[in-house]
């Protein structure tokens, strides 16, 4: 039996706090620049937008969009933690028994994500005339009005605020519920031992995976796809899942490396890192596969109402670089860098690739959400960087805090011995 | 006595894989070069004990994959861009995204076939090759350690002794034409 407990010590807290403060400072500077920015160019563009009769976007709207991106992004990492935990049980995997507390701890963010999500959704949509989701504009449904949109009105049975809220709450009830159930069983196993808890977790995990298969798709439609209300893509749920999954895997890998470097996780050796590296490598390719499947069909069939989604992203000034950068960071770099066995077993190397992948997928979510909400006014600036840093530090505080409260290694996991001798 | 390489072998027969691994270590420790070990099932840790370097097959796989990518892209660009330009679906003559599926398939195909081919050549499984069969029982219930006498300066009696003392149940000799 291995007794290990993570000490969320002051130096680690200080580092995370510094990151959070840096985020807040960048955010404030960003907001000041956005308000009084002496940039002549931006000012001219602003004037031009007014003259053209277009509604120029206020920094508050930009902030809401950034908050929404981070909500979806970090919520995804958290739920992938629970999902990864569940998968290990359903697959009856032995190699991962020693590291399972880390994906489990990611789930601690879920309740906070739920509150933040409801809060941002409410504040962003009900404090002004502007909506994060285009379909929330009531004038679209007025059949006699000038803004009447037959397509969106036809989707009203699914895309309406009460049902949307009900769905959002349902997802979180399921996800948070299963997180607490699995955690409870894992902790009970630590005390009582025996195989019965393992079997209980297998059953719970199987149910959770089925529910997550449905809710991951529908939540992706709700939170991201419905922003571009006219557009649709049948692979979208998979695509979001792939993006979340590879980000979650990279996060798990980074935390394992971090703990290992700080002298924890005596059970972990380069074989476990190799497997985690393989996961990141494989699911980077899986993400590319779903990304390309979506792009390829739309490109080939060339239907205007579908193609507009990629025209907005590929052929416009603010997003073109991000669009191709997204592909380079999320496919070419992990594919080439993590291809060899040595790369996957090299801690420093793996760490760099994981950071790249997490950054790359943040960019991916940015590219899904911003063009639909801010149109051609989206930028990647200090506000984006600031909110991401604030979210990342809050996320880390919650996860590490949760991790420090439970034994770092499952004491009575039936496959712990197998995990200890894992060798590939 | 000078001998031709690959003709005269001493075979140590082992019953148990744990004894085998210990024997491999002690035989190598005594300065004997082992030609090959045959076992009816994969024995964990045997590669390390024999001091084998990791296979370079993945490098061959990458090379063949890269060849497949290059071939597929060249073929499509040449066919649709140079030899017989056609407008398909309102695209330009050489639309890269539509080439990706074929490129992917040819990359995987050449990588896989190339790997199989290289493996067969390296392992002497190519057509018309006659593999050396040391002891048929290595496909049933015995582990067979083959030592090439030409590769070792030690005399046969000494090698037999080392094999016996490290736990071999039989020590045989095998000659090939």
Image (cartoon, grey):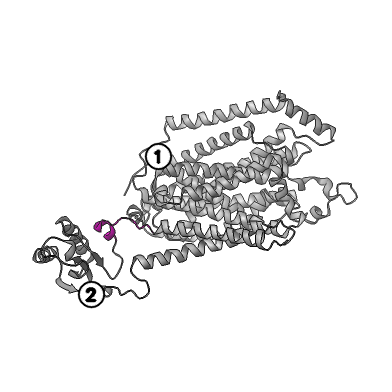
Taking the spot 50% from the left edge, 36% from the top edge, the residue there is A397
Asked whether, in this view, residue A45 is left or right of residue A168, the answer is right
**Residue A268 image offset from top left, x and y in percent:** 36, 47
A391 over B44 or under it: above or below: above
* Residue A231 on the magenta span: no
Q: Secondary structure at mark 2?
A: loop
Q: In this orientation, which residue lies closer to the viewer: A139 or B148? A: B148
Q: Residue B147: which quarter of the image?
A: bottom left
Q: Residue at x 43, y 63 (%)?
A: B115
- Looking at the image, residue A84 sits to the left or right of residue A60; the answer is left
Q: Which residues are magenta?
A: B44-56
Q: Which mark is residue A411?
A: none
Is label 1 on the same chain as label 2?
no
Mark 1–mark 2 CB contact (< 8 Å): no
Specify the subunit that label 2 lies on.
B
Q: Residue A164 at what x, y percent from top left?
A: 70, 50
Q: Position of residue A305 (x, y in %)?
A: 76, 54
Q: Which residue is mark 1?
A: A6
User: Does B111 sit above or below residue B128?
Assistant: above
- Asked if the magenta segment contains residue B53, the reply would be yes
> Which mark is drawn over residue B135?
2
Chain identity of mark 1: A
């Amino acid at each position: 039996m291995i007794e290990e407990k993570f000490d969320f010590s002051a130096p680690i807290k200080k580092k995370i706090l510094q990151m959070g403060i840096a985020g807040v400072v960048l955010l404030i500077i960003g907001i000041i620049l956005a308000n009084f920015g002496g940039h002549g160019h931006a000012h001219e563009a602003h004037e031009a937008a007014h003259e053209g009769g277009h509604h120029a976007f206020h920094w508050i709207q930009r902030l809401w969009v950034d908050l929404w991106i981070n909500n979806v992004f970090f919520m995804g990492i958290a739920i992938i933690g629970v999902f990864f935990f569940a998968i290990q049980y359903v697959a009856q995997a032995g190699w991962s028994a020693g590291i399972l507390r880390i994906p489990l701890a990611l789930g601690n963010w879920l309740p906070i994500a739920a509150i933040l999500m409801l809060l941002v959704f409410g504040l962003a949509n009900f404090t002004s005339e502007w909506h994060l989701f285009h379909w929330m504009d009531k004038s679209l449904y007025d059949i006699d009005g000038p803004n009447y949109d037959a397509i969106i009105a036809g989707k009203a049975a699914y895309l309406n605020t009460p049902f949307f809220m009900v769905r959002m709450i349902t997802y979180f009830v399921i996800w948070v519920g299963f997180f607490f159930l699995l955690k409870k069983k894992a902790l009970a196993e630590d005390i009582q031992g025996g195989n019965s808890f393992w079997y209980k977790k297998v059953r719970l995990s199987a149910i959770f995976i089925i529910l997550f298969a449905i809710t991951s798709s529908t939540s992706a439609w709700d939170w991201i796809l419905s922003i571009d209300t006219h557009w649709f893509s049948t692979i979208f749920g998979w695509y979001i899942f792939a993006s979340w999954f590879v980000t979650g895997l990279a996060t798990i890998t980074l935390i394992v490396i971090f703990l290992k470097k700080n002298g924890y996780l005596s059970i972990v050796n380069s074989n476990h890192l190799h497997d985690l590296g393989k996961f990141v490598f494989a699911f980077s390719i899986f993400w590319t596969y779903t990304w390309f499947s979506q792009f390829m069909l739309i490109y080939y069939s060339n239907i205007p109402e579908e193609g507009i989604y990629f025209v907005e992203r590929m052929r416009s000034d603010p997003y073109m670089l991000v669009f191709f950068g997204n592909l380079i960071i999320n496919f070419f770099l992990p594919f080439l860098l993590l291809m060899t066995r040595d790369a996957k077993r090299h801690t420093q190397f793996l760490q760099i690739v994981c950071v790249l992948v997490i950054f790359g997928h943040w960019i991916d979510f940015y590219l899904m959400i911003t063009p639909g909400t801010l149109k051609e006014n989206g930028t990647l600036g200090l506000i984006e960087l600031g909110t991401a840093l604030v979210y990342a530090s809050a996320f880390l505080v919650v996860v590490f805090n949760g991790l420090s409260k439970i034994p770092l290694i499952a004491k009575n996991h039936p496959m712990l011995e197998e995990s200890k001798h894992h060798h590939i | 006595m000078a001998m031709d390489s690959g003709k005269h072998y001493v075979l140590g027969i082992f019953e148990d894989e744990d004894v085998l691994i210990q024997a491999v270590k002690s035989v190598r420790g005594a300065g004997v070069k082992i030609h090959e070990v045959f076992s009816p099932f994969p024995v964990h840790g045997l590669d390390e004990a024999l001091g084998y370097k990791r296979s370079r097959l993945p490098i061959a796989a990458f090379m063949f994959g890269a060849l497949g990518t290059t071939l597929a892209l060249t073929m499509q660009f040449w066919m649709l861009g140079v030899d017989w330009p056609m407008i398909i679906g309102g695209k330009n003559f050489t639309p890269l995204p539509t080439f990706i599926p074929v490129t992917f398939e040819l990359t995987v195909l050449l990588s896989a076939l190339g790997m199989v081919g290289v493996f067969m050549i390296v392992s002497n499984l190519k057509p018309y090759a006659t593999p050396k069969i040391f002891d048929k029982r290595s496909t049933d219930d015995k582990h067979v350690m083959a030592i090439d006498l030409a590769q070792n300066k030690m005399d046969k009696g000494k090698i037999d002794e080392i094999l016996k003392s490290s736990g071999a149940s039989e020590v045989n000799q095998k000659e090939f034409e």
